[in-house]
Image (tube, rainbow, N blue to C red):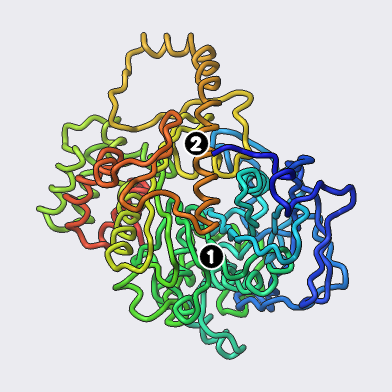
């Protein structure tokens, strides 16, 4: 799609001013003062309003309350505090293959973290009524933020202006870890006495509260509260699925459209209050807390130190709509984009590399009690007692990829399409990262937000696909000798491919938010490898790019709860079992 000089072709846009941009918001009796985004150009001014507090937290483990009190002038020039989480400067390195520092000071605050960022085209009138894209970040519900540099929306909004389909992007922070998802019967009773309804799901309710704030006030920023597209990745995508299964959405639709990237909710992961309480009780013992009151007094750092690596929603009888488990289909939206990346399972690389074929077969047979079903899975995925260690690792990656991501995504997409009422558009993202040369989990974020350039040293990671791998010392020495030259040419080639994929991804996501058809429903949109972008026959291409035949032969014959447990245990490694 051609890019145009927006200031000359669209009447809404004016050149940026030297002063800070302001947005009067009469319903809140305040004026928000923001900043001109660094990606702004004279032809495409982009404004950002940061750290806007959308809700208050009355106390630890309490439901958030919509914020309605603001000063006469609200300073929105700096990012607000993020949710308490593990402090790791090298967080991106294991997955993305690079280390970056945030370009601004990061503050964590348990009670001041519920804030959002609004990124919009500059110079638009209050009645512009632009479509709104509502971003929910990922991070296993234990890490991440809406202000993280990787997912800054400046370039995405600028692209929307350049292609004459302008949008406003809202990015939010929500509570994470135990602060956002702890649940037990004792905590439920404590909250009931304090006037709260439900337990756990504080982070999910934060997201609903942020959506309520946006529907009430985004019009002041030139947005259309009746044209909201949710989009999120990994835990953010799972959370979007949960929001669409919520009682709130069943009562009154929370959005018009949704984009689910690499993650859907799996009913076995959503436990009862009593089951969650058993897990919380073990954590409380390690913290020396004997009551809910004690737990509320434990230091933030101590709570973070004992937070599990992944947090899930709780089936508390309040948050989700009735009978959602038997019908986990997104409802009350007009259209859905849904897909995954080729190598999502690199998330579990350290644990996967500990498996041998013998230990793997024994664990699979222990989890899948039926001999026929277990042997069917082993045969279908190509695992036997004679499988060497490297092939055993490849098989483990494949099972994890299918059980955690590809198969559940396929199930939700097919069920939603079969029920009708929602347009379903499927995609696969197979474009390699310029840093790891693998289409790993979350690699699509590098292209969607376009905030990272492939500069400086790069490294390869082992990619366990189905292609033969040479292991001779002679080949390894030759690869070492040409590594510098090889990387040079790959980065050079990558620049053109990256541009194709970035433009193709951004234009389709933006067009979808504008109410357009991103591609035909009977087609599969492909992004990569090697810069390929386009529509392909859905069933044929999906079978070619994903292990559809394998999961239909093996996984669909096993109970979903067992598949989920198997994925947990394989991801934990041979030394641990799922509780």
Residue 35 shown left or right of residue 232 in the figure = right
Mark-to-mark CA distance, 1 and 2: 47 Å
Residue 59 position within the rendered picture, expressed as x and y whole percent measured from the top left = 67, 77
Residue 150 shows in the view: no
Task: Read off the residue under disc 1.
Answer: 286
Badge 2: residue crowd in 10 Å (few <14, some 14–19, many ≥20) = many
Residue, x 55% and y 77% (percent of image)?
290
Residue 69 shown left or right of residue 430 in the figure = right
Residue 13 shows in the view: yes
Residue, x 40% and y 38% (percent of image)?
534
Task: From the viewer's side, name the closer residue of 250 and 417.
Answer: 417
Q: What numbered label is drawn on residue 350?
A: none
Residue 30 shown left or right of residue 345 in the figure = right
Q: Is residue 225 above or below residue 306?
A: below
Badge 1: residue crowd in 10 Å (few <14, some 14–19, many ≥20) = few
Which quadrant is home to the N terminus? top right
Residue 210 position within the rendered picture, expressed as x and y whole percent measured from the top left = 63, 69
Q: Is residue 470 above or below residue 579?
A: above
Q: What numbered label is drawn on residue 501?
A: 2
């Amino acid at each position: 799609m051609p890019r145009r000089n927006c200031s000359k072709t669209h009447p809404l846009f004016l050149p940026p001013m030297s002063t800070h941009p302001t947005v009067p918001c009469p319903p809140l009796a305040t004026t928000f003062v923001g900043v001109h985004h660094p990606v702004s150009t004279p032809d495409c001014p982009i404004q950002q309003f940061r750290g806007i507090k959308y809700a208050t937290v009355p106390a630890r483990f309490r439901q958030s309350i919509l914020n309605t009190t603001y000063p006469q002038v609200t300073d929105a020039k700096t990012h607000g505090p993020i949710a308490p989480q593990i402090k790791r400067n090298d967080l991106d390195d294991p997955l993305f293959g690079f280390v970056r520092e945030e370009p601004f000071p990061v503050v964590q605050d348990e009670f001041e973290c519920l804030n959002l960022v609004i990124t919009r085209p500059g110079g638009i009138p209050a009645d512009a009524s632009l479509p709104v894209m509502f971003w929910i970040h990922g991070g296993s519900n234990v890490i991440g933020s809406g202000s993280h540099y990787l997912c800054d929306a400046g370039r995405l909004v600028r692209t929307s202006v350049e292609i004459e389909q302008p949008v406003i992007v809202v990015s939010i922070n929500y509570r994470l870890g135990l602060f956002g998802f702890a649940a037990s019967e004792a905590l439920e009773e404590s909250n009931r006495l304090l006037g709260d309804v439900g337990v756990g799901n504080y982070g999910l309710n934060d997201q609903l509260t942020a959506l309520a704030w946006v529907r009430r006030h985004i019009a002041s920023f030139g947005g259309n509260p009746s044209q909201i597209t949710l989009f999120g990745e990994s835990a953010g995508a799972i959370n979007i699925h949960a929001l669409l299964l919520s009682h709130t959405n069943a009562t009154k639709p929370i959005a018009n459209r949704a984009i689910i990237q690499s993650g859907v909710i799996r009913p076995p992961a959503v436990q009862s209050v009593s089951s969650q309480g058993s897990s919380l009780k073990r954590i409380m013992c390690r913290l020396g807390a004997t009551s809910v009151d004690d737990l509320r007094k434990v230091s933030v750092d101590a709570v973070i130190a004992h937070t599990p690596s992944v947090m899930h929603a709780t089936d508390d009888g309040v948050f989700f709509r009735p009978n959602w488990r038997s019908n986990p289909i997104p409802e009350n939206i007009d259209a859905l984009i849904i897909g995954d990346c080729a190598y999502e399972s690199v998330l579990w690389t350290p644990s996967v590399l500990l498996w041998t074929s013998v230990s793997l077969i024994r664990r699979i047979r222990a989890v899948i009690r039926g001999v026929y079903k277990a042997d069917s899975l082993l045969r279908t995925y190509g695992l036997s007692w004679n499988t060497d260690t490297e092939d055993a690792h490849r098989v483990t990656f494949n099972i994890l990829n299918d059980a955690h991501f590809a198969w559940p995504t396929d199930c939700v997409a097919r069920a939603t399409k079969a029920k009708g009422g929602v347009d379903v558009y499927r995609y696969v993202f197979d474009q390699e990262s310029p840093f790891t040369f693998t289409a790993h989990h979350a690699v699509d974020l590098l292209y969607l937000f376009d905030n990272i350039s492939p500069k400086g040293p790069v490294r390869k990671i082992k990619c366990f696909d189905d292609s033969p791998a040479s292991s001779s010392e002679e080949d390894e020495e030759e690869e070492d000798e040409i590594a510098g030259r090889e990387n040079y040419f790959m980065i050079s080639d990558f620049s053109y491919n990256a541009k194709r994929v970035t433009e193709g991804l951004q234009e389709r996501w933006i067009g979808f938010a504008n109410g357009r058809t991103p591609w035909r429903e009977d087609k599969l949109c492909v992004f990569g490898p090697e810069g390929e972008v386009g529509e392909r026959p859905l069933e044929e291409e999906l079978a070619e790019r994903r292990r559809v035949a394998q999961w239909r032969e093996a996984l669909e014959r096993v109970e979903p709860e067992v598949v989920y447990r198997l994925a947990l245990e394989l991801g934990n490694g041979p030394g641990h079992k799922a509780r």
